[in-house]
Image (cartoon, rainbow, N blue to C red):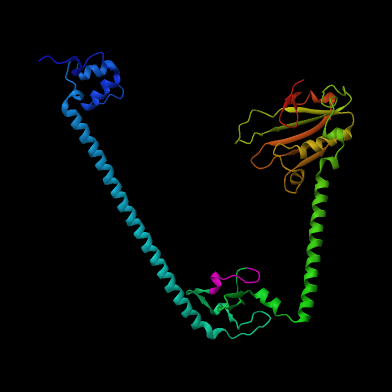
Amino acid sequence: GKQKKSEVVTKSMKVVELKEEAAARGIDTTKMKKDSILDCLVVGSKLMTKLEAWGEILRLRKKFEEEQLEAQRKENERLRHIEMHRQQEEMKRKAQHQVEREKKRVWEIGEQASKHTYDFPTVHGCKLAKTEELNFHGDPRSYVANCSECRSHLSFGAYACEKCDFDICAKCFWELTMTPEEKKIEEVLKAAQEKERREYEELKEKEEEEHRKKWDPKSNFKSNILKPSDNNTNPDGNKQTGYTVWSSDGYGNDGWHRYNGPPDKEFNSTYATIEDANARARYLFYWKNPWGQGADELMEEGQGVNESVDKNGLKTYDVTPDDSTTWTVGVVPNIAFVYLENATIRRNNDDGNFVMF
């Protein structure tokens, strides 16, 4: 007979109904649209979800899933019991091992009792044994014990009482066994050592402060040397009567590094007097060198610093550390600066920034 419309696939069916039918037929519709699902199911084909047997299939599926869940629960329970049993057995094994270990330790203490022959009432109420002659669970006691007085690790000359689990290091033992006269001597010695320590710390602090002051730019230079005024940083600030401080930094023609000719001689500042210009050159060279070295480091013997003074008293400094650039700072009359080779009024601002005038 003719199939009822509700028992066959139709285009009017909702997507959710089509997906349910597809699932019943074992078709994956995860990324499929309605038209594609209809093509797979074929319009007019009999709906499996409307068959009387479908209800029985669903029931059997549900029953199978429930049986699977129950089987998994029982398996989990079985594994849990196995793990609990394993842990209990492990605890028993460890407990038994500890009992055996303690039995051996009791026997060990008994075997070593005869070594406790030293009587020092001011140290401990029981007789003591030399730690170096004792074992602890088969290993030398000195490996595991610490001094009961100062908690330090034991070394040669220590003593122990195994019955009380007491240990004392050689230093604490000596302090506890000193005579009154020895204690007085020790107090005097400690006071002298403490005084020497304080004097050493004070001397060290004084030397550090003197070193800091010696190399502190503020202790060596006037404020206008450390921080030039606008007039000092202007190439025309002192007209032709002043003195220019310049610097250069670059590789020489050493056959190893890239060489593009002598580096630029960059304008740094100008001062009205030779004294101030030389001071600025010294500060720039030692305290503002391109490697960030301290002035004290650069002034150390063996650094290779060259310092020269011309007939007019104008100074020039240069240094070339191993495998590095040549750093040069010099002073010339303002009128002569523009005639220097590679002279430029591009100004190094001491922090790596350049200023053009």
| 40 vs 45, nearest the viewer | 45
Magenta span contains residue 273: no
- Which stretch is magenta? 141-151
Residue 191 visible in the picture: yes
* Residue 197 locus on image (x, y percent): 78, 63
Q: Main secondary structure of the magenta part?
A: loop
Rendered location of residue 95, percent (x, y): 42, 68
The image quadrant where one finds the C terminus is top right
Is residue 146 one of those drawn in magenta?
yes
Q: Is residue 307 found left or right of 5 in the rendered image?
A: right
Residue 314 appears in the picture as rendered: no
Task: Look at 53% across and 78% down and name the residue there.
Answer: 134
Up-down: is 281 above or below 40?
A: below
- Residue 258, by quadrant, is top right
Q: Residue at x 30, y 53 (%)?
A: 78
Query: On the rendered image, what quadrant is the N terminus found in?
Result: top left
Residue 293, quarter of picture: top right
